[in-house]
Image: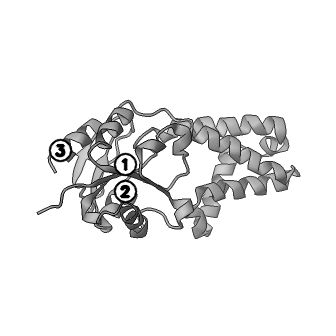
């Protein structure tokens, strides 16, 4: 017999908001800032070339697979250095990107569902990204929020799921994790002993499929459906 659900934990990007448009705007804001304050960088580098460099560094350094903020900072530092720009401005450039990174448009179901769910469950977040929930205006909904770059390991490592459960004082079998990524979110949570709900939103085109070995406890297309499923548990 399954234990009642005491806690619901959420992924952030592509679960509570669509991340693609956010990153496009954030990259544009960063390059607009650099054109004014570090003009040699956008003259010699493009959004695409910096992206390629990040992929190379991520592949060669396990730290950068966890700490995406540090990855971006390292690539900007490298570019500023190559271009002869003032390295003291890298932190300011990262501030511009980080603020834009947290300028998200929430899905319509997020605020009402979190408000209702918070009346019945403990709520938390586990993310491999570095969005600022306080800036976004959601921090008050969650008793716990863990970011991989601060914790030291990332999903799908079971330790990050167990840490959230420990902080909420619930056993993994009493928690449900909700996310969009089959491997990091669903397989990762289940491997840590949580139940896992795959949130496959209709706007994520092409629609993502599930690998044959991934079997979520439920599949929903929005948080309203999640509420309905939780009411049966």
Say whether disc 1 or disc 2 marks the residue closer to the N-terminus: 1
Check disc 2 and report the residue beneath it.
Answer: 185
- Vertical placement of 25 versus 40: above or below? above
Q: Which of 117 and 94 is in front in this view?
A: 117
- Vertical placement of 84 versus 19: above or below? below
Name the side, left or right, on which 215 lies relative to 129: left
Judged from the image, the secondary structure of the residue bearing numbered disc 3 is: loop
Q: Where residue 195 appears, x then y in whole percent?
A: 26, 58
Residue farthest to the top, as pictured: 108
Q: Where residue 134 appears, x then y in whole percent?
A: 54, 42
User: What is the C-alpha distance between the residues marked 3 and 2?
Assistant: 21 Å
User: What is the C-alpha distance between the residues marked 3 and 1?
Assistant: 21 Å
Q: Nearer the viewer, residue 150 or 61?
A: 150
Residues at marks 1 and 2 touching, judged by CB atoms closer than 8 Å = yes
Q: Where residue 218 appears, x then y in whole percent?
A: 22, 50
- Vertical placement of 225 versus 195: above or below? above
Is residue 222 visible to us here? no
Check disc 3 and report the residue beneath it.
Answer: 231
């Amino acid at each position: 017999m399954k234990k009642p659900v005491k806690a619901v934990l959420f992924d952030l990007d592509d679960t509570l908001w669509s991340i693609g448009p956010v990153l496009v705007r954030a990259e544009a804001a960063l390059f607009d800032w650099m054109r004014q304050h570090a003009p040699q960088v956008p003259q010699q580098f493009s959004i695409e070339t910096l992206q390629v460099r990040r992929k190379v560094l991520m592949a060669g350094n396990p730290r950068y697979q966890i700490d995406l903020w540090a990855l971006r900072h390292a690539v900007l530092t490298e570019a500023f250095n190559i271009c002869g720009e003032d390295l003291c401005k890298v932190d300011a450039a990262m501030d511009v990107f980080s603020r834009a990174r947290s300028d998200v448009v929430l899905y319509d179901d997020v605020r009402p569902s979190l408000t209702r769910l918070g009346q019945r469950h403990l709520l938390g977040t586990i993310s491999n990204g570095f969005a600022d929930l306080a800036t976004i205006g959601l921090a008050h909904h969650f008793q716990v929020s863990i970011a991989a770059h601060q914790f030291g390991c990332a999903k799908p490592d079971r330790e990050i799921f167990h840490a959230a459960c420990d902080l909420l004082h619930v056993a993994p079998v009493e928690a449900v994790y909700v996310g969009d990524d089959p491997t990091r979110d669903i397989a990762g949570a289940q491997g840590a002993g949580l139940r896992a709900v795959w949130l496959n939103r209709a706007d994520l085109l092409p629609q993502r499929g599930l690998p044959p070995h991934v079997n979520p406890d439920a599949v929903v297309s929005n948080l309203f459906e999640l509420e309905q499923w939780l009411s049966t548990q």
